[in-house]
Image: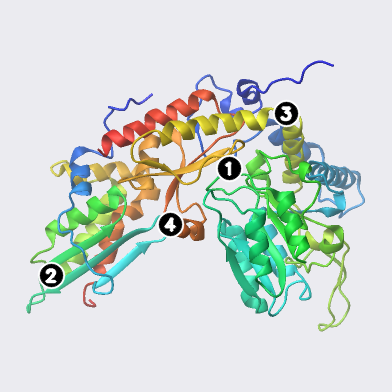
Amino acid sequence: MPPAPHFSPLDARRDFPAYAAPASPCVYLDSAATAPRLGPALDAARDFYLASNANPRRAVHALASAATRAFEDARSAVAAFLGAPPASVVFTSGTTASFNLLARGLPADLLGPNDDLFVTAAEHHSAYLPWQAAAAARRAFFHVIPLSPAGDLTPDLLSRALSAAPRPRLVALTALSNVLGRPQDIPALCDVAHAHGALAVVDAAQSAPHLPPAAWRACWDFLAFSGHKLGAPMGIGVLAGRPGLLDRLSPLLLGGEMVAEVPPGPDSPPVLAPLPSRLEGGTPNAGGAVALAAACRWLQALPPDAPSAVAAIANRAAALLAALPRVRLLAPPAPLSPLFSFAIDGVHPHDVAQILDESSLAVRAGHLCAQPLMRSLGLSAAVRASFYYTSLPTDADALLAAVQRVLALFP
Amino acid sequence: MTSPASPSPLYRAALLDHATHPRGAASIPPGTETSRMVNTACGDEVRWLVAFTPSGTIATATHDTHACAICTASASLLAEQLPGLTPSQIRSLAADFSTRLHSSTFPSTSPALAAFNALSAHPARLPCALLPWQSLLASLPPA
């Protein structure tokens, strides 16, 4: 058997049109915000619109049949990426939409008055806010679980938090914080949640491109991620759920395709369509779905050392910066961390990012849509560098030189 | 690649001087300020403590700014101008500042202000420069 190929970012870059020119536009270290656009994903969307441009599931003509096949094939591909059955996949516009659908659509017997709902201190606003609102609307108790000193939700921390509550019903946790970048032990955490009778809802927005979700063997009850963080176009995402649970969600969007019958009489409630249509009201982002499927297949075809290769560059960059005076990492990087955040004493994160931009480095600065986490760290803002399959080892050196320039400008 | 010694078009020495040695700055105990404004996107906070003369002009104006260099320098440059001004004059200056900020028309005769001309290429940073002015306007009596 031939040895498995090794990952090469130069090879990977051939699939990203932004890197087609000899000189890259910038050192892009903001893939945690949105990944570079993947050529095969863009091609898939374009091909769909050129050859199968019709509204899936709506008409009987040949184009609609082709569109439906493409759309449902995309669903199957995404399901395979997740290691789950196609019936567990609902397309949304992204992680934010997925969590809003879930938080509003859960039936009252799964989350109701006096129940205990848990999030972690690391949750992105796209998870934190919908669950906070759901708890308030349902008169449930909203708990924020603090992280370990290293920045993790350990099984022990989770178990202690759930044990202290009388009616733990749901735990929302991120698989990889967009600020701290440390992969979490999702199977172990889901086991703890289930042992306490709670649903496990996983935010895979940051982890999906870096930690193959199929390895979790669908241990979660619900999971969400966004296509644009995998290189697909913006505006497509997934809410995945156990089919028995997904079937119990109320739709967020009422309108076309999600209804089987609108009975006569203004007071007669509609008869809803079966899954997945019931939760995919309106014309779907079919081009986005086929693009997402292409992105999932691209990731699955990467050499097995690809995620660790990206993390190695991120870890080296973090180590270089941590050795500088006045630079503080917000958390110790883990072996598979694709990103890290840092602060520089005496220099505001926005000034850091601005000066890095003068060196053609793109990083993210601000509260990173994680104000509860920032507050727990005693910060209002930080700088984040995130790495992807297009990152080169020299990117770490470029980041070091640019941060050294910051220190020189603000002695 | 920009070297560590490369000058910055925005972070010029004159602006950095105001950012690191802000004029009119003082510690204002929370709750004692006459106005406070926060940019929640980045955590920049500017609080003013303003006192007026019997004739309605600015007697004293100090700011307690916890913010980026752009915001702090803007507060410092603003504080230098305030003693003796009327609220009407301040409102007029605020409008002029905003116009010049958006059009990159600060005169070169003020090196620190002229550095703000580089901000129009970075619209996300315009609120940083405007925050001290917006906060100060909240300290003024109604027009």
Residue under pointer 3? A304
Please name the residue that numbered disc 2 is placed on.
B86
Against A114, is A379 above or below?
Answer: above
The amino acid at mark 1 is: Thr
Q: Earlier in the sequence, mark 4 or mark 2?
A: 4
- Relative to B29, A354 lies left or right: right
The residue tagged 1 is A34
In x, y percent, where is residue A184? 65, 48
- Report the side of B110 relative to A368 (left or right): left
The residue carrying mark 4 is B41
Quadrant position of residue B111:
top left
Q: Are marks 4 and 2 in contact (CB under 8 Å)?
A: no
Q: Residue A404: percent from the left, percent from the top?
A: 34, 31
Quick check: marks 2 and 3 in contact, CB under 8 Å?
A: no
Element class at badge 3: loop
Asked which colour scheme the image uses, the reply is: rainbow
Give the answer, above or below, for where A316 lies relative to B35: above
Q: Nearer the viewer, residue B80 or A400?
A: A400
Tell if the residue under mark 1 belongs to the same chain as the one under mark 4: no
Tell me if label 1 and label 4 are in contact, CB under 8 Å.
no
Tell me residue A257's x, y (percent): 83, 61
Q: Which mark is residue A279?
A: none
Question: Label 2 to label 1, Cα distance in Å?
Answer: 48 Å
Please state which of residues B106 and A119 is positioned toward the viewer in this rendering.
A119
Query: Do callouts 1 and 3 mark residues in contact (Cβ within 8 Å)?
Result: no
- Could you tell whether B90 is left or right of A132 in the image? left
Determine the chain carrying the residue at label 3: A
* Mark 4 and mark 2 on one chain: yes
